Amino acid sequence: MFLKKIVYTVCSANHLAHCKTMADSFIRYNPAYKIIIVLVDKIDNRFDPATFEPYILLETGNLGIDAFDEMASQYSVIELNCAMKAFAAKYIMHHFTPDLLLYLDSDILVFDTFKEVEQQMQEHEILITPHFTLPYSDAHLLPKERDTIRSGIYNAGFFALKKGEETNLFLSWWTKHMHTECYYNFAEGMGVDQVWLNLVPLLFNGVCIYTDAGVNIAYWNLHERQIEFRGGQYFVNGNSAVIFLHISGYSFEHPEQLSKHQNRFELNAIPVLKDILFKYVAAVRGNGYEKFMRMECIYAVKKKKSLGIMKMINQLIKPLGIKVTDI
C-alpha cells in the first residue's frame, strides 16, 4: 500500500484549462492523490492561482533548478516544458517525499481508477508505456513505425515512479540529458525528453513496460484498441476498462481532425471517440480555455515553435513539389 501518492503535470499558462480538466477527471476516480501543477511560466498577476485549489501550483522559476535560465533561453516553449518533467519529478521526490509519483500530460482525460497501475508499482520502481504493441498494417500512412523509432518507443506523457534508489538514479540520469539535449531535432537523434525513455529498460532495474489496453489510448495505438460505451462505462477491446485517453494533437480550431500528427483515422468513423472529444472540448472551455489560450509563455516565447509530424513532413518535401494532405 502506498501511503503518500502524488500525481503531477507540467504546462505553460496557455494550457492551464486543459490541465485543470485532466486534474478534475483524475481526482474524481482517484481521490487519495495530491495533485501538483508545475507551471513552466509565471503567474505574474495574469490569473488567480486560488482558482486551482486544492491543487498545488508551482512555478518552475522558483524550484531552484540549476541552469534554468540557460534552458529557458535555448529551448522552444514545448522543448522547455518537456525538459521540466524530469526536473519537476526530482524536486517533488525530494521536497514532497511521495511513496508513489505519477506523471500525466495536461491533454489527458481519465475515466477510471489507477489501481492496476498501483498494483504493478508494488513490484517495480519505474513504469512506462509503449506507443503500441502491434505493427501498423499500412506503411504509407502516418505515423509510421519509423516515426516512433526516432521520436521514442515509449510515450513520455505518462509514467510512474516509486520511491527508491533506481528512481533516484533514473531521475539524475534523465535531468542530466535534459540540460542540453531536449531538442526536437530528429536528424541529431533528439526527440525531446521522450526519446531517452528508449534506454530506460536497459539502464535501470525494476522497470515495468506496461501494456494494459486501457492506458494511454491515443492516435498512435487506435489500430489495436477499439473503444465502446455500454452500461454507462467505456471499454476497450471487449471488457477492459478505459483508464485514460491521451488527446494528443487535437485542435479545437479543427475539431474534425483526430490529431494533427496522423492521417490513419477519420474521426467521423469513430463516433464514440468523437462524442468523447465533444464533451472534452466543453469541459476545457468551461475551465477557462478562451482566457488561458491567449497567454504567451514568459519563457522562450520568441523561440521557434515545434511542428507536428504532418507539418514537419510537408516542410521537408516542399522543394519536391509534393504535399501530404492533413485529414
Image: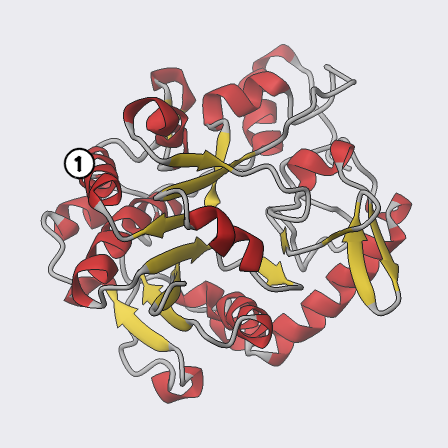
Residue 310: which quarter of the image?
A: top right
Judging by the rendered image, the residue that carries numbered circle 1 is 176
Name the residue rendered at 55%, 59% in the picture: 114
Q: Is residue 215 left or right of residue 231?
A: left
Name the residue rendered at 25%, 38% in the picture: 170
Classify 10 Å Cα crowding around label 1: few (below 14), some (14-19), many (20 and above).
Answer: few
Name the residue rendered at 46%, 69% in the picture: 16
Q: What residue type is labelled 1?
A: Lys
The x and y percentages for residue 140 are 74, 16
- SS category of the residue bearing label 1: helix
Between 129 and 62, the one nearer to me in the picture:
129
Q: Is residue 13 left or right of residue 117?
A: left
Q: State whether residue 226 appears in this view.
A: yes
Indicate whether 291 appears above or below 300: below
| Quadrant assignment for the N terminus | bottom left
Name the residue rendered at 51%, 70% in the picture: 23
| Quadrant assignment for the C terminus | top right
